[in-house]
Image (cartoon, rainbow, N blue to C red):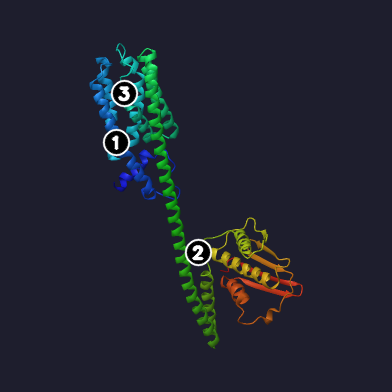
Amino acid sequence: MTTASDAATLEDAWGHIAPTRGATGAAGSFTRIRIERIFMLIAALSSLVLGIQAVFAILGSTEEQAAWRDPLVTVVFVSLGAMILACVLGRGVRLAAGAFAVIFVLALAIWPIATAGSQPQATDLPWIWYLVNIATLAAVLAFPLPLQIVWTVLAPVMFGVVRLVQGGFTPGFWLAVGLDVSFTLIIGGIVLTLAWVFRAVAANVDETRARAVHSYARAAAADAAEQERVAVAALMHDSVLAALIAAERAESPRAQMLATAMAREALTRLANTEQGAEEGSDAPREPRTIADDIEAAAAELGVVIEVERDVRGVAPLPGRVARALALAATQAVANALQHAEGSELSVRVTATGVWVRIDVIDNGSGFAVDDVAEDRLGIRASIVARVAAVGGTTAITSSDAGTSVRLTWLRGAA
């Protein structure tokens, strides 16, 4: 089948069934299409075989009066032929099968009138009996489950009732009709059960397949983004080193200014490469999301922090600024956990229309800020340089009473 035919198959035969989650179009319903196609072909073959048996039964029947026989046979068999053709082509199945299911029930309803005046035999099976389970099959192809159940029971029961009416409810008819109805009920129940079992299995296979493909795609995208980030980060580290070397060798005021601009640009680009694949885009963000990021990062470090917020009614700020402030504050939290064991650790995010400020405070034993070695990058690079790269400032005070890290960014500074 072509792709268009596959889509038409699902639209007709599965239109009443919820689509596979995480899958779109025929490509996301690989197993369902094939199961449904096999089911249609089996339905077409079964209908053809039973329809031929019904034709032979018509040729040897004398029950129906001539006035009713031809119109009734024509309507039923034309609708049956349309259903068989639709199943073979894989198009319009739901419409054709639904039409046959309804027409067959109507034919059963007028059967006693159509056969009035005949002398039926209890042991003779009328031609319409051969199509009872085809009506169930048509309902399975066309209707949702509640109506499928109704048709599975309704068609055999109606056949039994009209046969009893036709036979005048004589005792000889009860046993024969009871056996015929029981047989059709059993066969119809088997058809209904098998159809939904195979459909459920096919839908589950497709859903599992879609989830696996989606997970693989996400993992591949994250891996590619991470590899790209690492490569860019390495390049930016080289740019930072080049800027620092240029600054060291600068002698004239202009050379110093150019070296400073080079270092600022390199630090800005370096800070932007710190974004992981899961951290989102550089779209504007609300200041309160900074507090959410800090809480989430602290939870990953093994500590629960409730960040104080005073950010109501404040305009968004650039995404790279929000990310840089959150990462710097997270590093300050990590330092407090490592060196002060997180003693009385508190974090506050304050934002106004002019500035954004983050305070990270603990009451540990403190340290001498000026004595921090040049090669210790936890404060110099991960906090001070990161905030400076987006135009912010960092103020660190520490004593025996504890340590305070204040990050400040003025709007318009980035």
Report the amino acid beneath label 2: Ala
SS at badge 1: helix
Of tags 3 and 2, the one toward the viewer is: 3
Report the amino acid beneath label 1: Ala
| Residue at 68% from the left image edge and 81% from the top image edge | 370
| Residue at 34% from the left image edge and 25% from the top image edge | 104
State yes or no: discs 3 and 2 in contact (Cβ < 8 Å). Answer: no
Q: Which mark is residue 128?
A: 3
> Mark 3: few, some, or many residues within 10 Å (few <14, many ≥20)?
some
Q: Is residue 265 above or below residue 357?
A: below
| Residue at 31% from the left image edge and 38% from the top image edge | 42
267 or 84, nearer to the observer: 84
Point out the residue furthest to the right here: 401
| Residue at 27% from the left image edge and 29% from the top image edge | 51
User: Hey, which quadrant is residue 32 in on the image?
Assistant: top left
Report the amino acid beneath label 3: Ile
Q: Which mark is residue 277?
A: 2
Q: Which mark is residue 333?
A: none
User: Hey, which quadrant is residue 319 in on the image?
Assistant: bottom right
User: Hey, which quadrant is residue 300 in on the image?
Assistant: bottom right
Of tags 2 and 1, the one toward the viewer is: 1
Question: Which residue in the structure is indicated by mark 1?
Answer: 44
State yes or no: discs 1 and 3 in contact (Cβ < 8 Å). Answer: no
Q: CA distance from mark 3 to mark 2?
A: 66 Å
Q: CA distance from mark 2 to mark 1?
A: 52 Å
The quadrant of the image that shows the C terminus is bottom right
- Any part of residue 169 in sight: no
State yes or no: discs 2 and 1 in contact (Cβ < 8 Å). Answer: no
**Residue 129 picture location, percent across and down:** 33, 24
